[in-house]
Amino acid sequence: MAFAVHFAASMLACYLTAQVLAASTWTWRAPRVAIVCWQAVGLAVGLSAMGLPMALGLAAYDLPTGSALLALATDLSHGTLPVGVGAVHLGLVGVGFGIGAVLLTTTVRSVQATVRAQRRHRDLLTLVARRDPTVPGALVLDHPSAAAYCLPGVRPRVVVSAGTLDLLDRAELAAVLTHERAHAQERHDLVLLPFTALRRALPWFRWVRDAHERVALLVEMRADDKARELHAEAPLAGALRRFAACDDRITPAGTLGMGDRDLDVRVQRLMVADRPPRVIGATALAVAATLVALPVSLFLS
């Protein structure tokens, strides 16, 4: 029973950590650290959600969950079970495996849906997009709406619309292109994927849905930082303001768009150049490591 308490404590710690992360503003100044923390929370939640029913079902073994599972498998192979392990307990172990199967299946389905959407859009770009010498390394869509996005994948594409070319000046456009290339270089689509899967697998947890939204915003802020390193704050902030004032913005499914998330917040953040004290970042990473270490250690013991 003690191991079940540990898994329950891990889930509670994940919930409290998520609440702190959601309410904190230091995460805006250190988005990369915050993303790592959110990833740790997501991984620990998934492992703890699997481990809690397993630990309850295996309480009679009085062993860490990993060792207890091996002992159960050995007993089942010999056709015997210890006293205190019945159908209900085996059912709880099955629930744990079921949660793991749901998480895995949801992740696979999320990957498949994203890949299909990206493949369709890549085929469409082959037909309708064009190269433009004034926008090196990007494809141009002859569409009046404001669009600037990254189509991620093994062969990523940065795409802007003719409407965006008319909307931005040269410096702002350069900052936007750097922003989108940052998404491709750091594979932000893979950063978001586990949270998309977790949201689909655990839709009844509001804080899981909120985590997806928070990470999506942090991903945009991280790309903003990469653009700011090369182009300073003014061009990028100007581009964000122009996108915010434009009602006709589009971001296709399966892509990471420049102007589809919290533009006003991102502009305000760009005006603040300071970073949080290192002790905050170090403490946050230590908490993240601890959150992951507890359920992992219970499974591997």
Image (cartoon, rainbow, N blue to C red):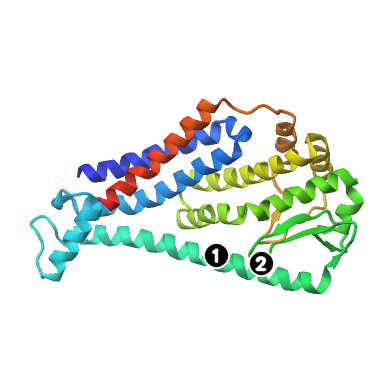
Q: Residue 227 carries which label?
A: none
Q: Is residue 259 visible?
A: no
> As displayed, is residue 98 above or below residue 232?
below
Q: Residue at x 55, y 39 (%)?
A: 34
Amino acid bearing label 2: Gln
Horizontal side of residue 225 vs 41, given as left or right: right
Q: Residue 172, percent across and down?
A: 84, 44
Asked if labels 1 and 2 touch by Cβ distance under 8 angstroms, the answer is no
Q: Residue at x 87, y 43 (%)?
A: 171
Task: Give the CA distance from mark 2 to mark 1.
Answer: 10 Å
Please state which of residues 225 and 11 is positioned toward the viewer in this rendering: 225
Q: Give neighbour class at mark 1: few <14, some 14-19, many 20+ (Cα, 10 Å).
A: some
- Helix, strand or loop under label 1: helix
Q: Give neighbour class at mark 2: few <14, some 14-19, many 20+ (Cα, 10 Å).
A: many
Q: Quadrant of residue 142?
A: bottom right
Amino acid bearing label 1: Val
Q: Quadrant of residue 175?
A: top right
Q: Name the residue under label 1.
A: 111
Q: Residue 118 carries which label?
A: 2
Q: Residue 2, percent across and down?
A: 21, 42
Q: Residue 247, percent across and down?
A: 82, 49
Q: Quadrant of the N terminus?
A: top left
- Helix, strand or loop under label 2: helix
